[in-house]
């Protein structure tokens, strides 16, 4: 049975795209048919961090009603399917976020796991992804601003009929975290599935346009991403 997750946060830069790319790759490494979709139609960068060079058709055209989802699907590491968004402002303006609901039906026929990389903020393009997945996973950093914004997304998700599945605490620096795990869970009212540490390998991998789970598989962040993927896939 397919599981669809929206990777959301409220605040920008918490690591949604990084988590989507690496969890998707780790699920593919685990042999799960996985598709990741850049629903951040305004500030698309999932294709960029995966080094997809030629993407003439993207989610922009699909949401504009001029292309089908198959046409916008590219192959990433380990057979991961990737639907990038386009970079042009015109493409963003032509994309109708509401069409994502129809696209979901086509996508769910094609994979075991579907991850939607959500935009920051609470505009229409941000709200739809909160409603179409089975669960929303909140990516939070150990800072009060990130937690407060995630709390807004939690409330918004519940208001629009979505389901929060848990949180991923990203960029954690154990000794220096402003807020520890238990305090974050209490403030957010959401349990933390796992923690991904602050890791320079993540930035190096992004610069190399390769997921860290491929470029530095032995790194602590890669271990965390593989652990979370195993949890989602029910692998002991
Ligand atoms: P978002 O999609 O939420 O805006 P990104 O995934 O683009 O966030 O991440 C923002 C920046 O933080 C990127 O430069 C990324 O490489 C970096 N980053 C994300 N997670 C980590 C981490 N665990 N350790 C170090 N850098 C990270
Ligand atoms: Mg992003």
Image (tube, helix red, strand yellow):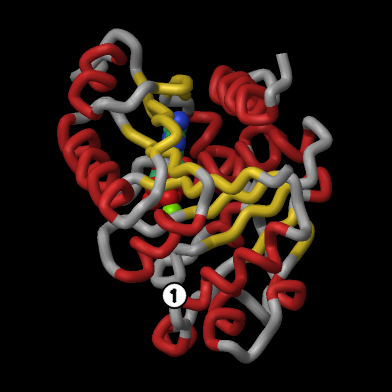
Which residue is rendered at x = 16% and y = 31% of the image? 144
Residue 194 relative to residue 57: left or right:
left
The furthest residue to the top: 175
The residue nearer to you, when weighing 15 against 98, is: 98
Image spot of residue 151 (x, y percent): 22, 39
Residue 73 relative to residue 23: left or right:
right
Query: Pointer 1: what residue?
Result: 97
| Residue 11 visible in image | no
User: Number of marks in the image?
Assistant: 1
Tell me if mark 1 has few (under 14), some (14-19) or many (20+) residues whose alpha carbon lies within 10 angstroms of its own.
many
Residue 2 relative to residue 186: left or right:
right
Can you tell which quarter of the image residue 166 is in? top left
Query: Is the CB atom of the residue marked by disc 1 within 8 angstroms of ligand 2's nearest atom?
Result: no
Image spot of residue 9 (x, y percent): 34, 45
Is residue 37 placed above or below 148 in the rendered structure? below
Which residue is rendered at x = 78% and y = 34% of the image? 29
Q: Helix, strand or loop at disc 1?
A: helix
Image spot of residue 162 (x, y percent): 39, 49
Image spot of residue 71 (x, y percent): 75, 77
Residue 187 relative to residue 84: left or right:
left
Which residue is rendered at x = 76% and y = 40% of the image? 28
Can you tell which quarter of the image residue 140 is in? top left
Which residue is rendered at x = 53% and y = 46% of the image? 134
Question: Which quadrant of the rendered structure holds the C terminus?
Answer: top right
Question: Which quadrant of the rendered structure holds the N terminus?
Answer: top right
Is residue 166 placed above or below 54 in the rendered structure? above
Q: Quadrant of ligand 1?
A: top left
């Amino acid at each position: 049975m397919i599981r669809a997750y929206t990777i959301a946060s409220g605040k920008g830069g918490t690591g949604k795209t990084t988590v989507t790319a690496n969890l998707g790759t780790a699920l593919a490494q685990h042999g799960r048919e996985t598709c990741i979709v850049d629903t951040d139609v305004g500030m698309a960068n999932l294709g960029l961090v995966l080094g997809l060079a030629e993407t003439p058709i993207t989610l922009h055209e699909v949401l504009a009603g001029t292309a089908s989802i198959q046409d916008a699907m590219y192959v990433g590491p380990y057979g991961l399917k990737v639907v990038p968004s386009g970079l042009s402002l015109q493409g963003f303006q032509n994309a109708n976020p509401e069409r994502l609901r129809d696209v979901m039906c086509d996508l769910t026929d094609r994979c075991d796991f579907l991850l939607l990389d959500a935009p920051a903020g609470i505009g229409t393009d941000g709200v739809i992804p909160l409603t179409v997945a089975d669960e929303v996973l909140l990516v939070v950093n150990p800072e009060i601003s990130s937690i407060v914004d995630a709390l807004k997304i939690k409330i918004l998700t519940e208001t629009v009929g979505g389901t929060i599945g848990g949180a991923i605490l990203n960029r954690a620096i154990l000794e220096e975290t402003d807020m520890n795990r238990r305090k974050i869970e209490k403030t957010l009212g959401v349990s933390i599935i796992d923690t991904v540490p602050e890791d320079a390998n993540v930035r190096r991998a992004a610069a190399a346009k390769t997921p860290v789970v491929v470029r530095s598989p032995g790194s602590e962040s890669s271990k965390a991403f593989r652990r979370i993927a195993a949890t989602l896939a029910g692998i002991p």
